[in-house]
Image (cartoon, rainbow, N blue to C red):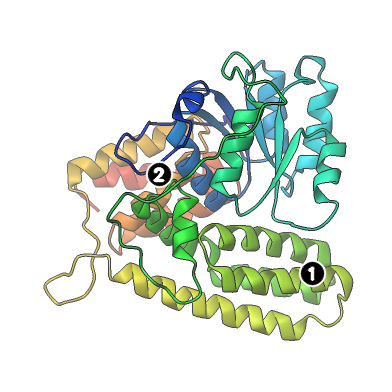
Amino acid sequence: MVMQAAKVKGKLRPTGSVEIQNNQKFEQIMGAKILLVEDNVINQEVAVGLLEQLQFDITIANHGQEALDLLEEGAVFDCVLMDMQMPILDGYQTSRRIREIGKYDKLPIISMTAHAMAGDKEKCLEAGANDHCTKPIDPDDLFSRLLHWIPVQHNQLTEGSTKPEVEVVPPVGTELPSIEGFDVSLAVRRVGGKLAVWERVLENFCQLEFQESSLLKIERALKDGLFEDAAAALHSLKGASGNVGAFQLASACLELETLVQTDSQNWQVPFDALKEAVQQTLMVAKGYLETLAPLAGNGEPQEAQPDTEELNRRLKGLLNQLADFDSTAKFSVSELLLKVGEGELKEALTEVHQALMAYDFEGAVKILSPVFDKNNTGGV
């Protein structure tokens, strides 16, 4: 069953979290309809955190086939941001098939890859993209390209016009933390200069990317000789690591990814280095996040939990998202996991998250419904 794509309504932040030069020109593209085609939930969160600054109407497709389904159903967009490495249907195939749909032959497509190698841009352009930017996304570069390519009904610039400079900065007075192995300043810029958003993304990154099964999956693929599968998993982890600013981990991913594509037999040493990088990154990230939580009476960090009424409201909203096959449910689950304490509800939400990673919305409803009913009667 095809999922309904996620709708994310951007909200303009007038508080100074983003400083945009040539603001009058950017006002011309506020509200443009953007199709974000991206399978990694961390990369989705980072992109939405940045794009919402210009009040874009954002739709998320989790893979290329979902994007094609939207277009074939008649959805209208002003620009497509296309990840090129995705399951089911990658960005290269998707771009080619979009161009085969006659009415979309002029739809701007900006490709996004975690490569920075010679020939990457040309390969994307040959597949049908209009432009290319590397991941982790540089906000200045992305905003300039959006302004350049969004159609004339939103943007009066011509194709040959000079692209304006864009600057995304934290609010004045924001003190950024110093964390070993992270470039926090750059990572915060990637989410529109909002430290709190980056901290939320970092928490989700720790939950989503550092499960023991992730490394086991990579190691199993390497041992079984499934080097393309291993490279794909490493590529995804590399991109997400870069987006949260974990540059040391991203470097370890890149080293192993490059090796398995050229010398697939000698992977053990760089894989061991990757495991060490994962452990180190997880340790320092969690250590920082624990300093943000309020202290309980015993001095241990503890998240403030929503009251029963608020929790029921959130759970009901999540069930509605699941019933609608709304992929923003992943974000709702992640936020709830940060708020609830240990117990039956947290276990159920963890299972729901795992179901969503497999695109099993019906299974997620079956898991959550009885827990919601029990919580609604005060049983959990």
Q: Is residue 89 visible?
A: no
Q: Residues within 10 Å of mark 1 (few under 14, many from 20)?
A: some
Q: For the point 75% across and 44% down, which residue is it?
A: 88
Q: Which x, y percent locates residue 92?
A: 81, 41
Q: What residue sits right under mark 2 in the picture?
A: 332
The answer to which quarter of the image holds residue 146 is top right
Q: For the point 47% across and 36% down, which residue is it?
A: 21
Q: Earlier in the sequence, mark 2 or mark 1?
A: 1
Q: What residue sits right under mark 1 in the picture?
A: 258
Q: Is residue 239 left or right of residue 9?
A: right
* Picture layout, residue 259 above or below residue 372: below
Q: Which x, y percent locates residue 310?
A: 22, 41
Q: For the point 64% across and 53% down, which residue is it?
A: 135
Q: How many marks?
A: 2
Q: Which x, y percent locates residue 18?
A: 40, 42
Q: State the quadrant of the N terminus.
A: top right
* Picture layout, residue 375 above or below residue 229: above
Q: Secondary structure at mark 2?
A: helix
